[in-house]
Image (cartoon, rainbow, N blue to C red):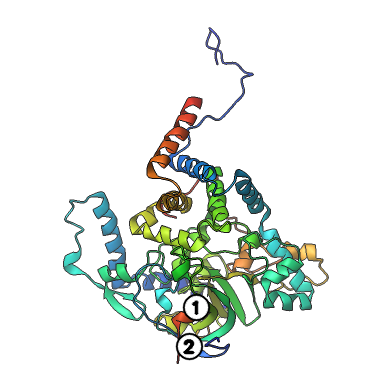
Amino acid sequence: MSDKLGHSDAHAPIVSKEMPGEWEILEIATRELAIQKGLLTAQDHRRWLEWMDAATPALGAKLVARAWVDPEFKKRLLADGTAACKEMGIFMYDGSIDTLKLIVTEDTPKVHHLIVCTLCSCYPRPVLGLPPDWYKSPSYRKRAVRWPRALLAEFGTIIPDDVEIQVHDSNAAMRYLVLPLRPAGTEGWTEEQLATLATRDTMIGVALPHTSKPTKLVSMSPSAPTGGH
Amino acid sequence: MIEARDYRNCIQANKRSACQLEDYIYLAFHVGTFSTFLFPHSRLFQSTACLTEVSVGLEKVDEKSAMLHRMVSDIGGLPAEPLNITDHQLLPWEKRCHALLETLAFLGVMSTEEKRRYVEDMGQTIYAALSYYEKWIMTASNFLVTKGYITPDELAAKIAEVRKRFEAEQ
Amino acid sequence: MRQFKTGERVRIANRVTVGHVRVPTYVRGKIGIVDRELPEFLIPEDDAFGRPKGRTRPLYIVRLRMSDLWSDYRGSSEDTLELEIFENWLEKV
């Protein structure tokens, strides 16, 4: 809004009026029609968004930290990850509250685990949140099951030759979480302190937990990636 | 402990494996397919004359047969482009799209497995060209029309209505 | 009655398929070991085609050696891969 001299109104609200793109328009149209047809309610949809927001790697880290300090819990966690989540009050919002769905695989000095879904992007979202773009990328999905060591090296993770790498291709009903090796020098740490070491990448298996500061940051772009993945 | 030169060799070995002849041909074929889509009259990428063998499971089949045998999403172990270790903050519509499909799956309207099939059925060109959530929303609208919950004209009308709604605010 | 037990050697079937299945081609025809018996689930061949009351089958985690999957595998000879295979895709060895 400008006055006769062309000065804009400094008190006018700044509102973004950008026209949404084709795909956002399709999303809005599809969702509104689905609600109109009674396939879901707006409340159902909003609740799911809230559940998505509540699920972050902090939940997985809680499981890891508890397993590190409590050997009996660790046994239960490895036997049935879904039941262990129930025990810890972690909400399996995907409906798998009473069915085995989460499998936790334990790193040992002899075996290191790596998780991938070659066919799509299966990921333990109730305990890790949404997967990063690289996990869903064709490159990761192609390479993890055939060149895991070279792939891990690109994450700065070197697994010695005398340690077995076991790759898990999440191709069916289960979702996987890595229970990393507890780093040395953490004796006497509280569960809360230990949980800070269990980062998302250590629970996928592309990184190893450590007590030193990170030297690399994943680049985050606020906009969507370009075509393909 | 693997030394620096060893994991550099790993990366080199990875690139070497990815550059075997059949893999070049696989890559060229798919570039060719995409180019044929863009330039349908181009004779440069007509490949039926010289099909080469690729591996599918235990079989060696020609590239055209591979399209029959292997789903577009079945890519484990195929020669790979370099990994781009990035992430992005989901756009609001992408988040809403994610919640829409998951809610429909949770309520038993559309199973997750059905969603995957719809994505695969889009075919290689669209599978490669669209982003993750673009594929999901295309699946959702496609699914609703295919199952008869909505008709194509209903969807077209709604899209037009939504567009008008935002245009009025510009 | 489940056909396979933990520790048993199994072969993943090598079938020509059209349409949606969840057995990646890179493991078809390969021999591995049952690592874990999982519950029964609706098979993807029915689930993906809108048949929620379709066939259920026991699911198994099968462990394979990387060196069996890839003739040019460059990692350790001990490296393995695990994935889930439904009973209808497993064969006795």
Q: Secondary structure at mark 2?
A: strand
Give the position of the C terminus of chain A as an image quadrant.
bottom left
Q: Is residue A147 above or below residue B101?
A: below
Q: What's the residue at 52%, 82% (across, down)? A: C62
Residue under pointer 1: C85
Q: Secondary structure at mark 1?
A: strand
Q: Nearer the viewer, residue A180 or C18?
A: C18
Q: Is residue C1 above or below residue A214?
A: below
Q: Amino acid at mark 1?
A: Ile
- First in residue order: circle 2 vs circle 1: 2
Q: What's the residue at 50%, 32% (across, down)? A: A18
Q: Quadrant of residue C58?
A: bottom right
Residue C82, position as x, y percentages in the image: 53, 78
Please tell me how crowded label 1 is: few (under 14), some (14-19), or many (20+) other residues with Cα within 10 Å: many
Left/right of residue A204 with respect to residue B120 in the rendered view = right
Q: Is residue A131 visible?
A: no
The label on residue C10 is 2
Left/right of residue A72 with respect to residue A19 in the rendered view = right
Q: Amino acid at mark 2?
A: Val
Please tell me how crowded label 2 is: few (under 14), some (14-19), or many (20+) other residues with Cα within 10 Å: many
Left/right of residue C66 with respect to residue C36 in the rendered view = left
Chain holding disc 1: C
Q: What's the residue at 55%, 65% (across, down)? A: A155
Query: Would you say the residues marked 2 and 1 are in contact, meaning their CB atoms lie under 8 Å apart?
Result: yes
Give the residue at the far top of this rendering.
Answer: A4
Marks 2/1: CA distance?
A: 11 Å
Q: What's the residue at 45%, 33% (across, down)? A: B161
Chain holding disc 2: C
